[in-house]
Each structure stands twice: as C-alpha cells, then as structure tokens.
Image (tube, rainbow, N blue to C red):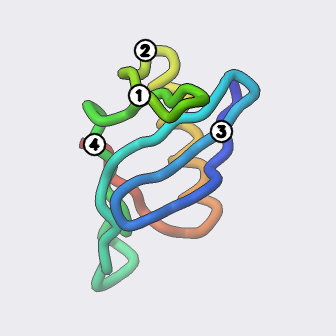
Amino acid sequence: MDYAVTTVCRGGIYLESHAGKAVAEGEGLAPGNQFLPGYVIYLNAIFMLDAAGARRPATGVEKENIVRAIQSHFDTRGTLVDFE
C-alpha cells in the first residue's frame, strides 16, 4: 500500500492510503544544522485510524509502509528524520 503524508504537526504525522488513515506520533525539532534530524518518529507509536478516529496499533507490514512513506516525504524536502 502506498501511503501519502497529509499533515505534519509538532506531535505527529498523518498519512492516508486507499486502505485508510494512519498517524505516526513523534516530535518536530528545530535542528541546528542539516546533519541533525528535523523530526523524530516513535516506532511503537504508529497507529491506524478508523472512520470514527479510533486507533489500533499498525501491523508490521503497515508500519514498514508508513515508515517508507515518511522517509520519502522528508527526503524530498532535504530534511532528516529519525526513527526510534
């Protein structure tokens, strides 16, 4: 599944795909230079969202696809993202 980043906020990144919506919680940072990450994502805080906004933990495959989409989003902007 191909996820697209729809919103980047200080506390999380929201994504959508044809299969549904997801959120990856993390922290937006103010890096001092280009070698420091601009965002940190917590791998244990990646969730799928249903239509009512209820959350469930993402499966391994969903998580891999979400991480790939976030990495691509930040790569195209020349910003580092760290996954912890």
Q: Earlier in the sequence, mark 1 or mark 4?
A: 4
Residue type pointed to by label 3: Glu
Which mark, by number, is residue 36? none
Q: Whole-Å distance between the Cαs marked 1 and 3?
A: 14 Å
Tell whether 20 sits left or right of 18: left
- Disc 3 is placed on an element classified as strand
Q: Which quadrant of the view contains residue 12?
A: bottom left
Q: Earlier in the sequence, mark 4 or mark 3?
A: 3
Find the distance from the CA under tag 1 to the CA under tag 4.
16 Å
Q: Quadrant of residue 40?
A: bottom left
Q: Earlier in the sequence, mark 3 or mark 2?
A: 3
- Residue located 48% across and 27% down the image: 48
Badge 1 marks a residue whose secondary structure is strand
Distance between mark 4 and mark 3 Cα atoms: 18 Å
Q: Residue at x 55, y 69 (%)?
A: 78
Q: Is residue 44 left or right of residue 12?
A: left
Q: Return the residue at label 1.
A: 55
Tags 1 and 3 touching, CB below 8 Å: no
